[in-house]
Image (cartoon, grey):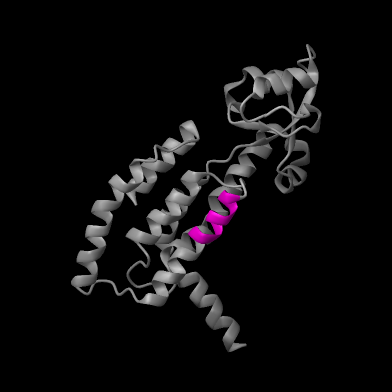
Amino acid sequence: MASLLLAGISDLREREVEPLIWPILAKPGVALLAYCIASGYVSIDLVTMILAFIPALVVGALFYLGWMGGADLAALLFLAVVLPRAPGDVLPFPLLVVIYTAIPSFVHRLIIGLRNCPSSLSRCMLSSRLKVKARDLLYNEEFKWWIVTDKRAGSLDVAAEPHEAVVSIVGEGLEEKVEATPGLPYVFHLAVAAWIAALLGDKPFIYMLNALLAT
């Protein structure tokens, strides 16, 4: 848990996680898991292991398509290996973490919406593309990790050349607004969600499932 939080903080600050951190952190995690299984503190069966890897498989497909980062995939593989199921839970821990990421993701988008378009907050929350002043994209540290999605950028590689993309759109009109999307730190969201999952477990979902079956 602490290891994932360290990786999440790195993602929040730099939007990247050193790849070597995962195998280094996984070794003590696997050793601890093996001890817990041997001592009977937690039980892991084949079905649980398979289900624990499903989130990583889905994100792996999205990574292949270029929609997710390599650190996102590595974080879910890390969770599936070192903590496939938490003690006392029925559902696999990585699956719970992915579900609980809705909470930090919503809060993050709410903060972005309040800062950039408070008058039309609902629209901002529903859209991943926002209108931002070119000056802010170029010089404001708050927008350092935003990605230019404006179609006027043409064939420019906006990830490799964000400054050139903005200049090609607005020229010297730095007050003009450009369409961009915030680069969200998904590993950080996973880290926060992991702590939520550790605190709440799968009890809310088991309770809702039992309530549905009782009706």
Question: Residue 95 versus residue 31: which sits nearer the camera?
Answer: 31
Residue 201 seen in this snapshot? no
| x and y, in percent, of residue 83 in the image | 35, 62
Instruction: Indicate yes or no whether the magenta region holds residue 110.
Output: no
Q: Is residue 22 left or right of residue 94?
A: left
Instruction: Indicate yes or no whether the magenta region holds residue 57.
Output: yes
Count of marks overlaid on the render: 0
The residue lying furthest to the bottom in this view is 214
| x and y, in percent, of residue 197 in the image | 43, 60
Q: Is residue 133 left or right of residue 36?
A: right
Quarter of the view holding residue 147: top right
Q: Is residue 177 left or right of residue 59?
A: right
Residue 165 seen in this snapshot? yes
Q: Residue at x 67, y 29 (%)?
A: 158
Q: Residue at x 44, y 57 (%)?
A: 196
Question: Residue 95 versus residue 126: which sits nearer the camera?
Answer: 95
- From what the image shows, is residue 188 above or below residue 203? above
Q: Residue at x 73, y 36 (%)?
A: 118
| x and y, in percent, of residue 71 in the image | 47, 44
Q: Identify the magenta region.
A: 56-64
- From what the image shows, is residue 137 above or below residue 60? above
Question: Residue 120 versus residue 168: which sits nearer the camera?
Answer: 168
| x and y, in percent, of residue 98 in the image | 51, 58
Q: Residue at x 58, y 50 (%)?
A: 64
**Magenta highlight: main SS:** helix
